[in-house]
Structure formats: C-alpha cells, structure tokens
Image (cartoon, rainbow, N blue to C red):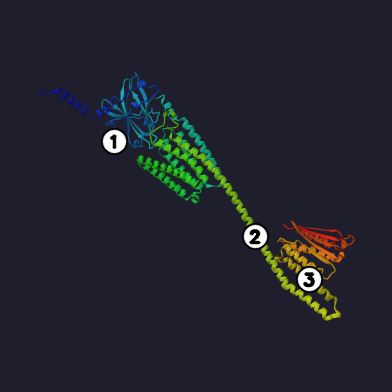
Amino acid sequence: MTIHTKPIILKICLLFFWVLCGSSASLLAQQKPGWDTIKTSEIRFFKSIKEKTGLYLDEQGSPEKEAVNSLPELQTVGPNYTRRIPSSFVGKPVYLQFTIKNDLDTVTTVYFLPGMYFEDIDLFRYNRQTNQLEPEPEYPGEGIFDPNVVSKLMLQPGETATFVTKLAFIKTTINTITPTLSFGHFLPTLLTELQSERKINTVISFLVCGIMLMMIFYSLAEFYINRNRVFLYYSAYAILLGVMFFFKAYLFKTPTVSNYFFESYFDFILQAGGTLFYFMFLRKFTQSATEFPLLNKVLLIQQIVTISGMLLFTILHFFTDLFQVQNLVENIVKYAWSACTVFFIIFAIVKRHHLLTYLAIGHCFLFAGGLLSLFLINSTYRFNPYLGSLVNDSLFWYEMGILFELMFFLVALSYKNRLDISARAREKERLLLEYEKSAIERKMAVLAAKQEERNRISADMHDELGSGVTAIRLMSELAKTKLKDHSLPELERISNSANDLISKMNTIIWTMKSSNDTVDNMIAYVRSYAAEFFDTTEIRCIVEYPEQLPAIEMSGEKRRNVFLCIKESLNNALKHSSATEVRILFKIGPHLVIQIIDNGVGVKSINISEFSNGLTNMRKRMESIDGHFSIRNENGTTVTLSIPLQ
C-alpha cells in the first residue's frame, strides 16, 4: 500500500502555524478580502469608511484585553446603524475594525470619527511584531478635539495599520455609527456640517419655540388678569416643551457633556413634565371633575403613570446600567399618552360636546404626530430619501402634532371664553334679578309693616278715641236736653266740636286702613260723605262714576289728600256758591280725574279772598301727591283734581 506523505506533512505544518500564531491568527482571519484596505491617498477632505469597517458587539462583556485580541466574525456597518443603533448596543462594548495604508511619502495624520454619541472611545493598533492589539496614545498637547468624539491616527510613509476602536454609547436611542476619516484641517468643517445637516428642521424647531413663547406670554397674561390657575398649567406645559424643542435644535450633534445629559435623560423629563402639566390643564379646562367624571379618572391615572414613569426612569438612569429597561419605561409612558389621546378623541365623539370636539381635533393631529415620531424613534425604517431629512425626522412630526394641537386649543379657548362671557352675563342678570327681588321683598315687608301699623293705629283710634269723643257728644246732648230752655252756648259748641272731631277722626281712620287702598273704595266713601254732608241742606248732590270700576290701588296718603280737597270744595260750594246742585264726576284712565261742579254764582275776584287760603291748601295737597289742581268759572264753579294712577 502506497502512502502519500506530502498532504499529511502539509496539514501538520498548517496546524503548527495556527498554534504558533495563537490569538493573532484569529484577528488576521477577520481581515478577509471583504474588508478592503483604506488608502490615505483616497482621502481628499474626508471619507466615509463604513463599507470597509467591520463591527462586533460584545454581548458577554468580556475583559477588554481578551475581547480586542479575539474578535469573532465581524459584521458590516449597515445603513440602519448610520440612522439609529439598536437599543441593545447601549451599555455593551461595540468594536469597529478597519485597516488603513499610508501610500504617501510623508508622515500622515488623519482623524477617525466613529459616529455619535459616546461616553468613551478607546483606540487600539495591531502590532505585527508582537501580534497584539496595543492601546494607541492620545498625543498629549495635540488633542485639540475631544477624544470621546474623534481619535488621532498617525501613519509613517508606506505603513499599513489595523485599528480596533472600542465604543461605549451614552444612554439614548439616537446614537449612530458613521465611521469617517478626515484630515485635521477639515475636521471642524465636517463637525459643523454634521450639526447643520438638518437646517430646515432646526428653523422649524425655532419657529415652534417662538410660537410656544407667545403662548407662554398669553397664558401668563390670562392668569394675571383672571387669576385662573388653568393658564398656569398651560404655561408650564408650553415652557417645558419649548425648552425641549430649543435644546433639541440647538444641541443637535453637539458632542458635549451637557448635550449627553440632555439627550440621555433630560429631554424625556422635560417632555414628561410638560405632558403632566397638560393633563392637569385638561382636567381644569374641561372641568372634568364635575362635568365628565370618567374623563377625569382617565386623566388622573395618566398623571400617576407619568409621575411613576419619571421616577422609575430616573432611578434606572442614575443607579443601573439597564438601558433597555429604561428605554422600555420611556416607551410605555409614551404609548400610555397615545392611548389616553385615543380615549379622549373617542370620548369627545360620544359626548358631542363642542369644547371637547375642538380639543379632540387637535388631539388627532397630536396623536398622529406623536405616533409617527415614536415609530421613527424605535425603528430603522425611513421614508423615501428623496423627500429629504425633514420627513424622516421624528422631532418634526412631534412638533407638527403639537403645533396643530395648539391651533385647535386656541379655537377651543375662544369658544370657552364665549361661553364664559355668556355665563357671566347670565350670572350677572341672575344676581340683578335676585337683588331686585330682594329689594321688592324688603319694600313689601316695609309696606306690610306700615299697613299693619296703620291698621293698628286706626283700630286704636276707633276703639279708644272714637268711643271717648262719642261719649263727649252724647253727654253734651244730654246736658242740653236737661237744661232745655236754659241751654248754654258752650254746650252747643262742645257738641258741634265733638261732631266735627268724630267726622275728622273717621276720615283719618278711613285713610289709615290698608283695606281701603283702592279707587273704588275712595269713590264709595266720597259718595257716602257727600250724601251725608248735603243731607240737611237744600242742595242736591249727584255723584257720577263708571259702571265698571277696575281694581286700582291708591295709597292712603293719596286718598287722604284727594278726599280733603273734595271736602274743601264741597264746603266752599255750601258756604259761598248759593248753588242748588253739586255734581261730583269721577273719570278713570291713566289719571283719576275728579270734577266738583256747582251751578252757583261762581268764584268772583271780590270774594276769592274769603277762601283763598283753602284754595292754596288744595293746590299744595295735590302737588304733594304729584297731582294737579285747577278752578274755573263755567256757569258756576268747576274744581278739577287730577292724580296719576301709575
């Protein structure tokens, strides 16, 4: 049997070579034909090297020396990593490997920019003599750029070097891997261009910030004028979101410690705090506690979820390395906001309340913008690149949702202000009516008390004074009867005075009794008095009045003054007119017109002085009750009294 020894010897040599090379062989094996060597002559100002860079994610968290010397199979830097890395990369070492050859005849220095944002960048160079990866020095005194942003590579003429970069990302989902080489003189321009690649987005963000600032001033002015806390809540919401938008635009791709803190922690806190105040604003603005209890409960639950999420997010960020859990908490809170927005829209549709409808339309835009923003944050999908970076920017869609929500909030605010104005007008009218009602009730109470007092006084006068005066008159009459022919004139005067006093007292009692405060009662009393007054005379008295007397009130003061004027007129007719007939006419309209007409000699200038004092008193009495008095000669004497009935 013939044995072919050459293949066996060749295999043994290969095995010996593999053992001799050790761990360095694994590194070199990775540099397979797919990973082309980068030549310095190919770099004009800068050059993207993602196609020639291998990537490895250390899932196990191996020690640094062991990891860099035994990198397994590398993967390519896909286009998705240039947009946003998976959240699983955060908190784990990520390695980039590339080979570069200085094909120039001078020492060449280039700078390596791996992407954004890193807490730490460690650069290693493969030493072909020791077959080990050794840390690359940072060149003290020459580091004009942050070593956590770029790394300096120095190559001798004709040198070919393999580099491995260990990356530690900050705790955010907007990290990117964009391996780029640049010459030092162009690096500032490159960083500026990276920060300016979303100029339109930045301008829009600043415009939105300006609009939010206007809303802040408006809300604070409304609070100052109306002292309504709801506008404080809205101003706090606008301030927090406005600050977030401003720093998102101002610090975009700015590799500073302040931006690291903002992107990894503070942007979510600002957004969550603003949203928390917005839920408080919604509860107060819609008066959900009294008007919509179910909506109030949902909004209250969202406040609790938001506060809990902020606390848990803070604990996970500062006290743990569980970024995926931290990112999950952030996403859960944001999805809870979206669910609440959907509930609000459905609730507004069911209730068909105008105020809720305007807010719900704004929330539709907010929901669409927020959901699209969340989708772009948590996925690597992007719209057609020909549409530009604007439509692929998650912040842009969120800002548009906020902007349209703000527009319809102003519509809802205008509607609510109109409702408030109407409500205040109705409340003012109600208070005015209550005041008028209260004033009328007080006035009625006073009148009732006056009438009660008048009734009491009239009853006392009738019972006490009336009986006493009647007794005086009766005793004077008895005295005259006993004396017969020896009657004294004083007794006659006492009897007459008693009769006159009884008549006057009856008149006072009649005017004071509230039950007599009507026109028809006054007419009846005048008719009775006139008949009795002319009963023992030769004068015929006629009283004329409408057949249908309306129930018109007439106060005791008016009745008393009118009656005394009528009484004075009848007395003048009896004493001075030489009349055979006296007519008393009552006419009822807007005014009560009373005419006392006699067929006597009339009022003559030569005898008017005899009763001028009585005429003056009659005129004053009528003027005191807003009435009118007149006297004229017309086939006798006509006295006219006119009193308004309203």
Question: Cβ–Cβ below 8 Å for labels 3 and 1?
Answer: no
Q: Horizontal placement of 20 versus 505: left or right?
A: left
Instruction: State the image quarter where residue 386 is shown.
Output: top left
Label 2 crowd bin: few (<14), some (14–19), many (20+), radius 10 Å:
few
Closest to the observer: 521 or 545?
545
Q: Image quadrant for the N terminus?
A: top left
Report which residue position mark 3 lands on. 501
The residues tagged by marks 3 and 1 sit, at their Cα atoms, a distance apart of 131 Å
Q: Is residue 147 visible from the viewing direction of this image?
A: no
List x then y, in percent, for residue 233.
50, 45
Question: Cβ–Cβ below 8 Å for labels 2 and 3?
Answer: no
Q: Is residue 469 above or below residue 219?
A: below
Q: Is residue 74 above or below residue 309?
A: above
Number of the label disc, if any, that sits on residue 63 = 1
Question: Helix or strand or loop: what does disc 2 sit on?
Answer: helix
Q: Amino acid at mark 2?
A: Arg
Q: Horizontal placement of 349 versus 80: left or right?
A: right
Q: Amino acid at mark 3?
A: Leu
Q: Residue at x 77, y 62 (%)?
A: 545
The residues tagged by marks 2 and 3 sit, at their Cα atoms, a distance apart of 37 Å
The residues tagged by marks 2 and 1 sit, at their Cα atoms, a distance apart of 94 Å
List x then y, in percent, for residue 453.
69, 66
Q: Image quadrant for the C terminus?
A: bottom right
Report which residue position mark 2 lands on. 442
Q: Residue furthest bottom?
A: 482
Closest to the observer: 243 or 65?
243
Closest to the observer: 276 or 42?
276
Question: Helix or strand or loop: what does disc 3 sit on?
Answer: helix
List x then y, in percent, for residue 475.
79, 78
Number of the label disc, if any, that sits on residue 30 = none
